[in-house]
Every structure is written in C-alpha cells, then in structure tokens.
Image: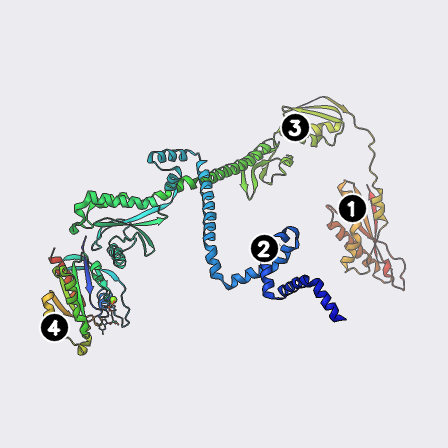
Amino acid sequence: MSVAKKICLIGRFAVGKTSLVKQFIEKQFGEKYKTTVGVSISTKNLTVENKDISLVIWDIAGFEQDGHYAHYMRGVHGLIWVLDGTEPESFKILETINNSLPEIKQVPSVCFINKCDLVDEWVIKESEINSLKEFNYAVYKTSAKTGENVEAGFTKLASLLLSSL
Amino acid sequence: MSKERDILKSLLLKEELEVLNQLKSKLLSEEQFTDEVAKVLSSAIKRSQKTDPQLEHALEKPIKKGVLRAFSESKQSIIDALLPIMGQLIRKTVTNSIKQFVSDINRAIEQDFSIKSLKWRWQAKKAGITYPEMLFQKTIRYQVTDIFLINKDNGLLIEHAGSDDLLKDNNAISAMLTAIQSFIEDSFDSEDAHLQSVEIKNQNFIIATGPKVYLAAVVKGNPTERLKQRFQEIIENIHAEYSEMLLQEDTYQNNLELNDFLRRNLVTKSLSDKQKEVNTLPWILMLIALVTGIAYWSYTRNQSLKNIWQKSSTIDGLYVQKIERKDGGFMLYGLLDPLADTSKLSDDAVTFVTKPYASLDEAIVQKRINQALSHYQMVQSRFNNGLLTLTGEINHEDSQLLLTRLYSINGVNHIDDGALVKTNPPTDQPEEDLSPFFDQINNAFIRIPDIKNLALIEAQLGFIIKNLQLLEEKGIKMQLTLIGTSDCAGLLSDDYSLKRANTVKELIGASLKENGFINTKVKKCTVTNQTNNKSLLGVKFNLKGL
Ligand SMILES: Nc1nc2c(ncn2[C@@H]2O[C@H](COP(=O)(O)OP(=O)(O)OP(=O)(O)O)[C@@H](O)[C@H]2O)c(=O)[nH]1
Ligand SMILES: [Mg+2]
C-alpha cells in the first residue's frame, strides 16, 4: 500500500496550474482557458527512489477570495507555488499567502515559474528567482505547453515528501 | 281677473305653496336628492329585499360586473385581502387530507397481524418506538455498498470498505468529498455547515461528520432518517474507540481493525431480506401453480397413455409390445390378428405398427370357426377352452371337408361332432342354367372387314371372352368351333375365312386358361359372287357343352 500525500497548487489565476496538472497526468496541453472553480482534484501514483507514493493533487482556483485557501490547504503535505513568468502580478502570491498562513512555511514546497516556452516575454528578473529559492526547496522553470520540467518538479516534491517520512 | 285670483290663491294657500316650493327645490337639486336617498337607501334595500323578490335579480348583474372589474383593476389588493384566508384554507385542507391519509395508512398497518408484524410490534415496543415507525425501518429498502472513513482536514482516505472498483479512485473521491466540505464551510463561512449528502459519479453519498474524521457512505435506494442517525452513531463510536489511530497517517489504508469495523457496517442484505419476505410469496404461489400444472399435465398424459394400454389389453387378437407417444397421437407396436376388432381405439389416434399373426384368443378362434361355418347354415357351434362342439345337420359329403377345415384352425384342439347329424346328399341337385351364356355366344357374329385391324376385332370379342371365362371357371367342359365366313367374292375367300377364324381363336385363347377346346373351320363358298360385301366377312361361333 503506497502512502498518500496531499499536495496543493497555489498561484494567481491563469498562471497555468490546471494546465500543469494536466500535463503531468495526461501529458496533454490545451490553449483554451477554463478557470477552475473552487478546487479540482486528481491523483497520481509515482515511484520515487523505489518508494511508492500516491499524490492527491489539489488544484486550487487562483481567483483570490479572502482566505479561501485556508480551507483547502488544511493538512497539506506539500505545496507547489505556481508563478507566470509573463505576469508580474503573479509573483506577489507567495508573500500574501505566507503572511496570512504563517504555518505553511513548514510545509515542503517547490516553485514553478511557468510558461517558460514564452521566455522572451518573461518579465521576471534573475534576482527575483533567487529570492524565491529562499522560500522553496527548489525552483523550476516549467512549461505546461512543452512539458518542460513538469515531471521533474512534481517528482522533486514527491521525493521531498517521502524523505520527510 | 287672474290677478285677483292669484291674490286669492296666495291668501288661501300661502303655507301650502311654501311647502310645495320647498319640496320642489329639494327634488330638483340632484345633490340634495342624493343626500335624501342616501339617508334611506340602506333601509330601503333591506325593506325591498323582504318584499320584492326581484331586487336580488336586479342587483345580480351590476354587482357581478363590479366585482369582476374590481378584480381586474386591483388584483394585488384583493390577493392581499384573500391571502390570510386562503392560506389558512389551504393549510386546513392539506392537513386534513394528510391526517386522513396517515390515519388510513395507520389503520391499514394496525390491521396487519401477520407473524412478522407481531414480531415487529414486539421489537417496536422494546425499542420504544411506534409500530408504523418500526415497519418503515424494516421495510424501507436501501443498501450501503461502500463506506469511506476520511481525514476531515486533508481529505486523505483513512479506510475504505466495500467494492474496490466501484469508484476506481478512492483517494480522489475522499479528497473531492473533503473539498466539497471545505467549499461549503467556506461558502457559509462556518465550520458547522456540514455536507450531509452528495452525489458524485452517480453515487449517492451520505455523510456523517465527527471532530477529526468523517464518514461517507454510498447508499443505494432510499436511506431512512434512521440510517443517517446510525452513521452518526458509527462516527461517534469510531472517535471513541479508535481515536489515536485516526490521525496516524502512516497507518492509513492499512488498518485492518478499522477496516473490519467499517465492513461490518455495510448493508448489502437489507434489500434482499425484505424482498424475500414480500416478493417471494407470489413466486411461491406461481411455482406451486406451475408444479401443479406440470403434475396435472403429466398426470393427464400418463392417464391417456394408461388408457390406451387398458383399452388395447381388452382387444382380442391384439398383442401389444409397446405404445409410444408421437405427434399428439400414439404408436402401437405389436402383433395383430386380421380378425381383431380395433374399433375401441378408433377415437384415440392410434397408429398400428403391427405384424399379422394368428391369435389364440377365444373370441378370435370363435370368429374363425364362424367364418368356416358360414357356408353351413344348419350347423351350430359352441367353443370353449379349445373344445368345439358342433350340433345341427350337415350333408354327409361336406362334413369331412368341414371337419378338416375346422381342425386346421389354430386353437381348436378338439371337435365333438357326435351331435351333428350327417344327411345324405340330395340326388338331383338343381343345375345352374348356363344356357344364356351359350346362346349369347352362339348368336354372335364378329365382323372382320380388315384382318389387320385387331383392335376392332378385340372390341367385339369382349362379352364372348367374358362368358367363356365364366364357363371355364365353373369347370364346364365345352367345345367351341369358330367358323370363318366370307362374301365369296374372290377365289381365295375360303383361305381368308380360315385366317379370320384363326385370328379370333388366337385372341380368345390368350384370355383363357386353356384353349384346347377351340377349333376352327370355314364356311366354304359354293359359288363365286361378283360383288363385294364386307359385312359378310367375319366369324361365327358354335359352342357346345360336353
Ligand atoms: N504558452 C503557455 N500557455 C500556458 C502554459 N500554461 C498554461 N497556459 C495557458 O494559460 C491559460 C490558463 O491556464 P490554466 O491552467 O487554466 O490556469 P489556472 O492557473 O488553472 O487558472 P485558474 O484555474 O483560473 O486559477 C490557458 O489558456 C493555458 O493554455 C504554458 O506553460 N505555456
Ligand atoms: Mg485552473
């Protein structure tokens, strides 16, 4: 019996959370944007370093509502912060949420800077990326479209969760 | 003149005129008149209602019109006015009919006194609930096919009992249910707002929430309020008994004790229990009916077969080996004496597949004896146990013949003819008169205009051959001479005549057993005629008995 872990994807709307999950699980990508309402749940079984893990992925809607994350993030084991390299507003989320939910600082997390296929349009500076590393175990430049670093990012988090057992 | 009269008038009627003028002005001023009428209107209506039956009639139309207009012009205020009354009215009617319905049901239930119902009555008494309540509990149908025990915080599945592949991904289901819970708490901004039931992937979940974990049960059918209560009790029990394990995530989905506990609370039989009791009855009845039907059918089938056996065993001269059913009828195999009388079975669609044999059944032997005796009307017989007793009288000559014949009958072992009187044969037996056959032949003349036309000759010979055959059969000894005749118109007439006679002889002889008694000759021509006469060409007959 594999161990089950709850992970949450958090990020501003339209950064590509749902697309990343879809890429990770189904290896598919769609250009069309359908915003998530509430939360969308999927599961994925992985074997990392010879250990089985069952990820229960909570893809939480990005539309900020006061404190709505709190409910969905209860008991979370791992976090994926998702930023959009082309959207400066999306960087603020880490700070906002870390402020409102200080306890989640303890939770293992990785950060995805998404849409790296559009790297020409990126507005994020290297210094900013470095500061992200302070909060996270790892920072990945990902693309839900090409699949770049998607599997690597999720697997990294999974191994973090397994090592914390 | 008129002036004086006016003065006089005013002197005499001054006061009256004043009153009159007052009245006049009163009546003429509409306003004033209305005022006056208004004063008396209600009492006038009252009074005329008593005295004048036409009043209501007269008022009906304008009032109706008025009311209708009022309705259409000020709906809302009328509705407002009616609402309190209507609401009460409706409530009253509805409660009354519900009361009626409930009391009808209760009466029906109370009148149920089956053994089961008595048991339930007893259980209801023990549980301190009413019998109808118990009845509902016992009869409402549902199944609990799956139970999920879920961490209330993170939605991780703690244990699951039930069909494993029902929902495919139990982890996802647990998370989804939890997410929905969170969504509700979020939306109502209250931790006390709990999800009670939800449908996911066409599965109905009933949810019972505890402080740490909650329980989601997949329920098929109609869950009762009691079932929901039960789940609540279960979740409370779980918290009491397994409290420590509940938050140990490393034991999740690997806790056999907990899993066992959940499994025990699945309800998979409740449906069938009830169905057995209620629904099997008609089945049983049907089964009984069916079994009876089959039994009756095979009984009648057997009966009819038995019947045939019975009947055929009473038929003399019939030996039955087997009887089979075939295509709604029967095939009877065995031996059948040609003299047997099978008319008894003629109504039964029996096909005889039999071999002929000589039966020794007394009745058949008797028949055979009767056949043999049929020519001897003066002889009577009695047959018993192989002994044939003959009485009456018989021609002495015939008696030997008869006895030989009777002895040849199988089954006749012994013949007692002591009482059979043998008489001498009558000396002059009247001989059958055969002369007409002779005469017919002797008078015949066969015309043979063309010797090669055998068909014509044969056609004329028909009755001659017939007569000859008959006489031959009777053993009459005879001699037939065929005489060829001619018209004597040529030198070879006699030769032709002989040919004619021989041809006829051949034709006749072929149809007889023996033709040695036939000879031919020619009626010789003494003169030679000059003219041909074909009607004279032919054969004449001369038949004699010897
Ligand atoms: N080019 C590019 N487009 C992307 C990428 N990821 C997502 N998108 C597009 O961005 C839009 C939003 O993607 P979603 O995955 O729906 O975003 P989300 O974060 O789930 O949004 P919410 O559910 O509203 O919070 C879609 O039109 C995607 O096609 C990416 O890596 N590259
Ligand atoms: Mg989304």
Number of other residues with Cα within 10 Å of mark 3, as a class: few under 14, some 14 to 19, many 20 or more: some
- Numbered disc in front, either 2 or 3: 2
Number of other residues with Cα within 10 Å of mark 4, as a class: few under 14, some 14 to 19, many 20 or more: few
* Residue placed most toward the observer, A58 or B333: A58
The CB of the residue at mark 1 lies under 8 Å from ligand 1: no
In-image side of B139 versus B400 (left or right): left
**Residue A147: percent from the left, percent from the top?**
20, 70
Residue position for label 1:
B468
Question: What is the number of callouts on the image?
Answer: 4
Q: Which residue is pictured at 45% across the width and 53% down the height?
A: B84
Alpha carbon of mark 4 to alpha carbon of mark 3: how far?
Answer: 140 Å
Residue position for label 4:
A128
| Amino acid type, label 1 | Leu
Residue position for label 3:
B407
- Numbered disc in front, either 4 or 2: 2
Q: Secondary structure at mark 1?
A: helix
In-image side of B45 versus B85 (left or right): right
Please tell me which of labels 1 and 3 falls first in the chain: 3
Above or below residue B535? Residue A83 is below
Taking the image in four quarters, ligand 2 sits in the one at bottom left
- Numbered disc in front, either 2 or 1: 2
Here the colouring is: rainbow
Q: Residue furthest top?
A: B418
Residue position for label 2:
B42
In-image side of B498 versus A142 (left or right): right
